[in-house]
Structures are given as C-alpha cells and as structure tokens.
Image (cartoon, rainbow, N blue to C red):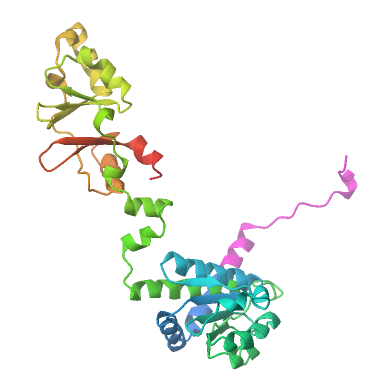
Amino acid sequence: MGSLPPSLELPSPKISEKSLLELFKSQQNHLNYFFQHLSLPQTLQFTQTLLQCQGTIFFTGVGKSGFVANKISQTLISLGIKSGFLNPVDALHGDIGILSDCDVLVLFSKSGNTEELLKVVPCARAKGAFLVSVTSVEGNALSNFCDMNVHLPVERELCPFDLAPVTSTAIQMVFGDTVAIAMMGARNLTKEQYAANHPAGRIGKSLIFKVRDVMKKKEELPVCGEGELIMDQLVELTSKGCGCLLVIDEAHRLIGTFTDGDLRRTLKASGEAIFNLTVGQMCNRNPRTIGPDAMAVEAMQKMESPPSPVQFLPVINNQNVLIGIVTLHGLVSAGL
C-alpha cells in the first residue's frame, strides 16, 4: 500500500566515485583560491580589533551565515573570550539593548546586502558599538556602513548553479575559527585554562582529572601482607573488583602485586602446593606504579604501554606508601 506500480517506480539516485572525487577536488580548488587571495593585512587588523575589545564580541548573520556566526562565537566562548550571537531579527525587537560602546559587532554576509543586517546597523551604531562587516561581494552596502570590512574572496560556490552557499560558508567558518585560534595564541591560553572551560567533556577531563580524583582508596583497596597464604586471600582478591591484591608491609609500603592471572598461573604450576604458598612468594615485586598528582590520562597511557598492557596501577606517595589504586575500568567510567 502506498508504493508505485513497477512501471512507474522512480530510478534510485546514484553518484559515481569519480564524480564525487571531482566535487571534492573542485571544493579544494575553491578553498585554495580563498587562501591565495585573502588579505593578510585586513585579517590582522580584524584580529587585533577583536583582541583589543574591552567589552563583548558579538556576531550576527542571517541564514547559513548566521549559523556560522553563532558557531564562531561559541568557539571564542570556549576559549574564555566574552562573546555572543545576536539574532538580527530579535535585535530589532529589544535584543539590541545588550550592545554597549565597549562592544564589537561582527556582521557575516556573503553579499553584504542582507536586508535584516542593514536594518541592524544604524541601531547598533546608535549604541556605540564598533561595527565590522565580513563579506565576499565587492562594493556592497554593508561594508559602506560599517567601521571596518574584511573581504573573504570567493571564486564561486560548489553548487552547479553557483547559488547554494556551501563554499562561501566553508570559507567563513575557516576564517572565523582560524582567527579564534590566533587570539588563543595571542592571549597565551594554557591547557589548564582551556580545560577549565570544558569540565564535562573528554577534553576537559583529560586535562583536569588527576589520579587522586579517580583512584580507589582506603576500604576499597584489596590489601594483604606478604606472609598471608594465597588461598586465604581469595575473597579479598575477588571482592574489591580490582583483579589483584596489593601486597604491603606493616608501614603500608607497597611490596608488590598479585593478580588473578598470577593465581591461575600459580595453580597450574604448583597444583596442591598452592595451599602452602604465601602471597609474598608469588607476587610481582616490580609492578608499574603512579603518583596521586599525575594526570589521569597519563595513568591510562602507562597502563597501555609495552611490553604488555595492565588493568590497574597502584598509587604510591614519595615514600612508597600505598594510598590508592587506579583501574582501567575506573578511568573509562570517569569518561577518559
């Protein structure tokens, strides 16, 4: 029900690998044209203007250019730079009130003749904001009304009709995000500062979380003395979910580790003799360890390093005292 008779079925659209490759090469050529003709002095002046802004850098645009403007604003925000997106229609109905004479308003428009943006200009100027147009058509109206204009050279759109804004918006995005990274470098943003703006994502966690933030400690640790019989420690080995025993002395200093893999190998090699063996006799006395102030991502790298990966790392202080354990499962659960 609802399907066409066989004689009326429409052919399925198809595209060849060759024609797809040609499109990508054409887009590459269009982007190369942009890079070869972009004015570096204009771009530098634009970047310096944003860097010197004492207030907020607002971006605006209509349609696809609006989406790009919003994205570039979000990039700056993620770098700790005060920025925002100003919808041009909403601006004419009250949102223009957010502008001040300390702000910069960047208007993205391929043609530079977008009616909504042209209506915003006098209102933004009345608020005292510094206006910058970013356009691609020479001699456009918007550039004539703004304090500064940046020309983004576009050879043509990839669209066969030279209409759909696909190349021009790609150029806008490349331009805006590259300027954002230039500002990041000029402001000497550190990894720690960047991570502080991304606390919930993997980026932030890899730069913020330390071993002490993700390790198990105290009652969660599967500890035992080296003189304990292996068979007496099976509950401790399996109940803490670490897959190992952490062998310590009376001062809580780490002696070694004994894993469930060690248990299987010992049982295979010793048979019934395992009932008389102590953990200290069979433990690994040279395990990989890590300190509590190391980055959590470093712990993961250390677990995966040659000669063979491990599932856990004992955490010790400068006196070799055991204070915790970090497991691969714990790191993954933390979002790393």
- Point out the image quarter for the N terminus: top right
Residue situated in front as seen by the camera: 318 or 38: 318
Residue furthest toward the top? 272
Could you tell me residue 304's position as x and y percent? 29, 41
Image quadrant in which the C terminus is located: top left
Q: In the displayed structure, would residue 196 be above or below residue 161?
A: above
Q: Is any atom of residue 65 visible in this view?
A: yes
Q: Position of residue 125 (x, y in %)?
A: 58, 88
Q: Is residue 163 left or right of residue 287?
A: right
- Residue 113 visible to the viewer: no
Q: Quadrant of residue 112?
A: bottom right
In depth, the one of 244 and 320 nearer the eye is 320
Q: Is residue 32 above or below residue 126?
A: above
Would you say 165 lies left or right of 85 here?
right
Report the span colored magenta.
1-25
Residue 152: x and y, percent?
Answer: 54, 82
- Residue 107 in the image: x percent, y percent? 58, 80
**Relative to the observer, which residue lies in front, 64 or 115?**
115
Vertical arrangement, residue 5 with respect to residue 47, above or below: above
Is 65 on the left or on the right of 318, as rendered?
Answer: right
- Image side of residue 46 versus residue 330, left or right: right
Location of residue 55 by image quarter: bottom left
Q: Is residue 255 above or below residue 190?
A: above
Q: Can residue 157 be found in the magenta stretch? A: no
Q: In the image, is residue 14 part of the stretch drawn in magenta?
A: yes
Rendered residue at 31%/60% (across/down): 192
Q: Nearer the viewer, residue 313 or 88?
A: 88
Q: How many marks?
A: 0
Looking at the image, which residue is at 57% across and 66% down? Answer: 24
